[in-house]
Image: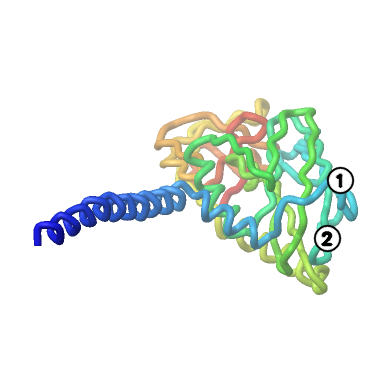
Amino acid sequence: MKNLLLTTAIALTFAMPTFAAGTHDGGHGAEKTASHGADGHSDNHAEMMMIGMPGDASKVDRTINVTMVETDDGKMLLEGDEMTFETGETIRFVIENKGELEHEFVLDTMERNAAHKIEMAKMMMEHDDPNRITLDAGASGEVIWTFANDGTFEAACLIPGHYESGMYRAVAVGEHAMKASMTMAATDVQVAQADVEYTKGKVTKVDAKGGKVTIDHGPLLNLDMPAMKMVFRADEAMISKLSEGQEIEFVAEPVKGRLTVTQLK
Protein backbone atom coordinates (compact mmCIF):
# COMPACT_ATOMS: atom_id res chain seq x y z
CA MET A 1 0.00 0.00 0.00
CA LYS A 2 2.83 2.39 0.94
CA ASN A 3 4.60 1.55 -2.33
CA LEU A 4 1.40 2.29 -4.26
CA LEU A 5 0.96 5.70 -2.57
CA LEU A 6 4.61 6.59 -3.14
CA THR A 7 4.38 5.65 -6.81
CA THR A 8 1.21 7.77 -7.23
CA ALA A 9 2.84 10.78 -5.52
CA ILE A 10 5.89 10.59 -7.77
CA ALA A 11 3.71 10.32 -10.85
CA LEU A 12 1.73 13.42 -9.83
CA THR A 13 4.92 15.33 -9.06
CA PHE A 14 6.23 14.82 -12.64
CA ALA A 15 2.82 15.39 -14.21
CA MET A 16 2.16 18.80 -12.61
CA PRO A 17 5.04 20.76 -14.22
CA THR A 18 4.12 19.29 -17.60
CA PHE A 19 0.53 20.47 -17.15
CA ALA A 20 1.69 23.94 -16.04
CA ALA A 21 4.07 24.24 -18.96
CA GLY A 22 1.28 23.35 -21.35
CA THR A 23 -0.96 26.04 -19.84
CA HIS A 24 1.82 28.62 -20.10
CA ASP A 25 2.53 27.87 -23.74
CA GLY A 26 -1.14 28.08 -24.61
CA GLY A 27 -1.60 31.36 -22.78
CA HIS A 28 1.57 32.87 -24.20
CA GLY A 29 0.59 31.88 -27.69
CA ALA A 30 -2.81 33.48 -27.26
CA GLU A 31 -1.24 36.72 -26.04
CA LYS A 32 1.13 36.85 -28.99
CA THR A 33 -1.73 36.34 -31.41
CA ALA A 34 -3.81 39.04 -29.79
CA SER A 35 -1.03 41.60 -29.66
CA HIS A 36 0.13 40.71 -33.17
CA GLY A 37 -3.30 41.44 -34.55
CA ALA A 38 -3.76 44.53 -32.40
CA ASP A 39 -0.72 46.31 -33.83
CA GLY A 40 -1.93 45.64 -37.35
CA HIS A 41 0.84 43.31 -38.50
CA SER A 42 -1.24 40.19 -39.01
CA ASP A 43 -3.89 42.19 -40.85
CA ASN A 44 -1.20 43.77 -43.00
CA HIS A 45 0.27 40.42 -44.01
CA ALA A 46 -3.21 39.12 -44.87
CA GLU A 47 -3.87 42.15 -47.08
CA MET A 48 -0.47 41.84 -48.74
CA MET A 49 -1.38 38.30 -49.79
CA MET A 50 -4.43 39.66 -51.54
CA ILE A 51 -2.26 41.73 -53.88
CA GLY A 52 0.54 39.17 -54.04
CA MET A 53 3.99 38.72 -52.54
CA PRO A 54 7.58 40.03 -52.70
CA GLY A 55 9.11 39.03 -56.03
CA ASP A 56 12.35 37.27 -56.90
CA ALA A 57 14.76 39.72 -58.59
CA SER A 58 16.10 36.90 -60.78
CA LYS A 59 12.62 36.16 -62.15
CA VAL A 60 11.41 39.64 -63.13
CA ASP A 61 9.15 39.58 -66.19
CA ARG A 62 9.31 43.29 -66.95
CA THR A 63 10.07 46.72 -65.51
CA ILE A 64 7.60 49.52 -64.81
CA ASN A 65 8.90 53.07 -64.44
CA VAL A 66 7.15 55.36 -61.95
CA THR A 67 7.84 59.06 -61.37
CA MET A 68 6.68 61.04 -58.34
CA VAL A 69 6.02 64.68 -59.24
CA GLU A 70 4.39 67.83 -57.89
CA THR A 71 2.72 70.25 -60.30
CA ASP A 72 2.55 74.03 -60.18
CA ASP A 73 -1.19 73.89 -59.53
CA GLY A 74 -0.69 71.89 -56.30
CA LYS A 75 -1.29 68.36 -57.56
CA MET A 76 0.90 65.39 -56.61
CA LEU A 77 1.04 62.55 -59.11
CA LEU A 78 2.39 59.07 -59.74
CA GLU A 79 3.27 59.23 -63.42
CA GLY A 80 4.73 56.55 -65.65
CA ASP A 81 3.92 53.27 -67.35
CA GLU A 82 0.48 51.68 -67.36
CA MET A 83 -0.19 49.45 -64.34
CA THR A 84 -2.06 46.48 -65.80
CA PHE A 85 -0.55 43.05 -65.16
CA GLU A 86 -1.12 39.37 -65.77
CA THR A 87 -1.77 37.12 -62.78
CA GLY A 88 1.54 35.62 -61.67
CA GLU A 89 3.67 38.33 -63.30
CA THR A 90 6.73 39.56 -61.38
CA ILE A 91 7.32 43.28 -61.84
CA ARG A 92 10.26 45.51 -61.01
CA PHE A 93 8.95 48.99 -60.17
CA VAL A 94 11.71 51.56 -60.68
CA ILE A 95 10.55 54.63 -58.78
CA GLU A 96 12.05 58.12 -58.94
CA ASN A 97 11.02 61.07 -56.78
CA LYS A 98 11.35 64.16 -58.95
CA GLY A 99 9.37 66.29 -56.52
CA GLU A 100 10.52 68.68 -53.81
CA LEU A 101 8.96 66.69 -50.97
CA GLU A 102 9.34 63.21 -49.50
CA HIS A 103 6.92 60.69 -51.03
CA GLU A 104 6.15 57.01 -50.64
CA PHE A 105 5.02 54.30 -53.04
CA VAL A 106 2.67 51.68 -51.60
CA LEU A 107 1.11 48.67 -53.35
CA ASP A 108 -1.98 47.35 -51.57
CA THR A 109 -5.76 47.00 -51.66
CA MET A 110 -7.83 50.18 -51.74
CA GLU A 111 -9.39 49.25 -48.40
CA ARG A 112 -6.02 48.74 -46.72
CA ASN A 113 -4.65 51.99 -48.16
CA ALA A 114 -7.70 53.91 -46.96
CA ALA A 115 -7.31 52.54 -43.43
CA HIS A 116 -3.58 53.20 -43.36
CA LYS A 117 -4.10 56.74 -44.69
CA ILE A 118 -6.18 57.48 -41.57
CA GLU A 119 -3.39 56.11 -39.34
CA MET A 120 -0.81 58.22 -41.16
CA ALA A 121 -2.93 61.34 -40.61
CA LYS A 122 -2.66 60.80 -36.85
CA MET A 123 1.10 60.30 -36.77
CA MET A 124 3.99 60.00 -39.18
CA MET A 125 5.25 56.41 -39.24
CA GLU A 126 8.30 54.81 -40.79
CA HIS A 127 7.88 51.47 -42.53
CA ASP A 128 10.06 48.63 -43.65
CA ASP A 129 7.67 46.54 -45.74
CA PRO A 130 8.38 44.87 -49.09
CA ASN A 131 5.28 46.41 -50.70
CA ARG A 132 6.35 50.01 -50.09
CA ILE A 133 9.24 52.43 -50.35
CA THR A 134 9.73 55.98 -49.03
CA LEU A 135 11.94 58.32 -51.04
CA ASP A 136 13.40 61.72 -50.25
CA ALA A 137 13.26 64.42 -52.93
CA GLY A 138 15.58 63.47 -55.78
CA ALA A 139 15.99 59.88 -54.60
CA SER A 140 15.12 56.67 -56.46
CA GLY A 141 14.54 53.04 -55.56
CA GLU A 142 12.67 49.91 -56.55
CA VAL A 143 10.01 47.47 -55.42
CA ILE A 144 9.90 43.95 -56.87
CA TRP A 145 6.48 42.36 -56.63
CA THR A 146 4.68 39.23 -57.84
CA PHE A 147 0.97 39.74 -58.50
CA ALA A 148 -0.39 36.38 -57.43
CA ASN A 149 -4.10 37.18 -57.43
CA ASP A 150 -6.61 38.53 -59.90
CA GLY A 151 -8.23 41.82 -58.91
CA THR A 152 -8.11 45.60 -58.76
CA PHE A 153 -5.62 47.22 -56.38
CA GLU A 154 -3.87 50.53 -55.87
CA ALA A 155 -0.48 52.24 -55.86
CA ALA A 156 -0.45 55.34 -53.67
CA CYS A 157 1.42 57.77 -51.45
CA LEU A 158 -0.21 57.79 -48.00
CA ILE A 159 1.73 60.70 -46.47
CA PRO A 160 -0.96 63.13 -45.16
CA GLY A 161 -2.33 65.33 -47.94
CA HIS A 162 -0.49 63.57 -50.77
CA TYR A 163 -3.21 61.06 -51.67
CA GLU A 164 -5.80 63.84 -51.54
CA SER A 165 -3.64 65.85 -53.95
CA GLY A 166 -3.85 63.05 -56.51
CA MET A 167 -0.94 60.74 -55.73
CA TYR A 168 -2.56 57.37 -56.44
CA ARG A 169 -2.94 55.01 -59.40
CA ALA A 170 -5.17 52.08 -60.24
CA VAL A 171 -3.48 48.66 -60.44
CA ALA A 172 -5.35 45.95 -62.34
CA VAL A 173 -4.33 42.28 -62.38
CA GLY A 174 -5.83 39.47 -64.46
CA GLU A 175 -7.34 38.69 -67.84
CA HIS A 176 -9.85 41.51 -67.52
CA ALA A 177 -7.17 43.93 -66.33
CA MET A 178 -7.83 46.66 -68.89
CA LYS A 179 -11.56 46.77 -68.18
CA ALA A 180 -10.92 46.62 -64.44
CA SER A 181 -8.44 49.47 -64.70
CA MET A 182 -11.00 51.71 -66.38
CA THR A 183 -13.61 50.84 -63.75
CA MET A 184 -11.08 51.39 -60.98
CA ALA A 185 -10.20 54.85 -62.28
CA ALA A 186 -13.85 55.91 -62.10
CA THR A 187 -14.16 54.39 -58.61
CA ASP A 188 -11.03 56.24 -57.48
CA VAL A 189 -12.61 59.57 -58.34
CA GLN A 190 -15.78 58.72 -56.45
CA VAL A 191 -13.88 57.50 -53.39
CA ALA A 192 -11.61 60.54 -53.38
CA GLN A 193 -14.63 62.84 -53.51
CA ALA A 194 -16.42 60.87 -50.76
CA ASP A 195 -13.34 61.12 -48.54
CA VAL A 196 -13.27 64.94 -48.70
CA GLU A 197 -14.18 66.62 -45.40
CA TYR A 198 -15.20 70.26 -45.78
CA THR A 199 -14.64 72.79 -43.00
CA LYS A 200 -16.86 75.80 -42.35
CA GLY A 201 -15.19 79.19 -42.08
CA LYS A 202 -15.45 82.92 -42.63
CA VAL A 203 -13.06 84.85 -44.85
CA THR A 204 -11.61 87.78 -42.91
CA LYS A 205 -8.98 88.97 -45.40
CA VAL A 206 -8.05 88.39 -49.02
CA ASP A 207 -4.56 89.18 -50.33
CA ALA A 208 -4.96 88.56 -54.06
CA LYS A 209 -1.50 89.86 -54.92
CA GLY A 210 0.19 87.63 -52.36
CA GLY A 211 -2.03 84.62 -53.11
CA LYS A 212 -3.19 84.44 -49.49
CA VAL A 213 -6.52 84.33 -47.67
CA THR A 214 -7.20 84.57 -43.94
CA ILE A 215 -10.01 82.32 -42.70
CA ASP A 216 -11.61 82.03 -39.27
CA HIS A 217 -12.46 78.33 -39.43
CA GLY A 218 -13.66 75.29 -37.53
CA PRO A 219 -11.56 72.16 -36.92
CA LEU A 220 -9.63 70.88 -39.94
CA LEU A 221 -10.35 67.19 -39.41
CA ASN A 222 -8.23 65.95 -42.31
CA LEU A 223 -5.21 67.74 -40.81
CA ASP A 224 -6.11 67.12 -37.15
CA MET A 225 -6.00 70.88 -36.45
CA PRO A 226 -8.29 72.78 -34.03
CA ALA A 227 -10.52 75.74 -34.87
CA MET A 228 -8.59 79.00 -35.28
CA LYS A 229 -7.96 81.97 -37.54
CA MET A 230 -5.07 81.47 -39.92
CA VAL A 231 -3.62 82.35 -43.30
CA PHE A 232 -3.86 79.92 -46.21
CA ARG A 233 -2.37 79.94 -49.67
CA ALA A 234 -4.70 79.90 -52.67
CA ASP A 235 -4.17 80.02 -56.42
CA GLU A 236 -5.48 82.82 -58.61
CA ALA A 237 -8.63 80.94 -59.61
CA MET A 238 -9.48 80.18 -55.96
CA ILE A 239 -8.74 83.74 -54.82
CA SER A 240 -11.18 85.09 -57.43
CA LYS A 241 -14.00 83.19 -55.71
CA LEU A 242 -13.32 84.64 -52.26
CA SER A 243 -14.23 87.95 -50.64
CA GLU A 244 -13.95 89.43 -47.16
CA GLY A 245 -16.85 88.45 -44.89
CA GLN A 246 -17.83 85.46 -47.07
CA GLU A 247 -19.08 82.32 -45.32
CA ILE A 248 -17.50 79.29 -46.96
CA GLU A 249 -16.99 75.54 -46.75
CA PHE A 250 -13.52 74.58 -47.86
CA VAL A 251 -10.80 71.94 -47.92
CA ALA A 252 -7.21 72.81 -47.01
CA GLU A 253 -4.27 70.53 -47.72
CA PRO A 254 -0.49 70.82 -47.46
CA VAL A 255 0.90 71.73 -50.88
CA LYS A 256 4.68 72.01 -51.10
CA GLY A 257 4.81 72.41 -47.34
CA ARG A 258 2.20 75.21 -47.16
CA LEU A 259 -1.46 74.93 -46.13
CA THR A 260 -3.48 75.68 -49.23
CA VAL A 261 -7.19 76.04 -49.98
CA THR A 262 -7.78 73.38 -52.64
CA GLN A 263 -11.58 73.06 -52.77
CA LEU A 264 -14.66 75.21 -52.14
CA LYS A 265 -18.39 74.55 -52.15
Return the residue found at the far top. Answer: 210
- Amino acid tagged 1: Asn
Separation of marks 2 and 1 at Cα, in angstroms: 16 Å
Residue at point 60%, 58% (across, down): 47
Q: Quadrant of the N terminus?
A: bottom left
The quadrant holding residue 84 is: bottom right
Residue at point 83%, 52% (across, down): 91
Counting residues from the start of the chain, the first of labels 2 and 1 encountered is: 1
Q: Is residue 210 left or right of residue 218?
A: right
In the depicted structure, whether residue 216 falls above or below residue 154:
above
**By what rule are the colours in the image chosen?**
rainbow
Q: Is residue 57 left or right of residue 237?
A: right
Percent of width and height locating residue 76: 72, 42
Q: Is residue 37 left or right of residue 53?
A: left
Percent of width and height locating residue 221: 46, 44
Assign a secondary structure to mark 2.
loop
- Crowding around mark 1 (Cα neighbors within 10 Å: few <14, some 14 to 19, many 20+) is some
**Count of marks overlaid on the render:** 2
Is residue 261 at all visible to an observer of this figure?
no
Is residue 69 at all visible to an observer of this figure?
yes
Say which residue label 1 marks. 65
Using the image as rendered, state which of residue 238 and residue 57 is in the foreground: 57
Assign a secondary structure to mark 1.
strand
- Amino acid tagged 2: Glu
Percent of width and height locating residue 90: 82, 55
The circle on residue 89 is: 2
Residue at point 64%, 43% (across, down): 129
In the depicted structure, whether residue 150 falls above or below residue 60:
below
Which one is closest to the eye, mark 2 or mark 1?
2
Percent of width and height locating residue 43: 52, 55
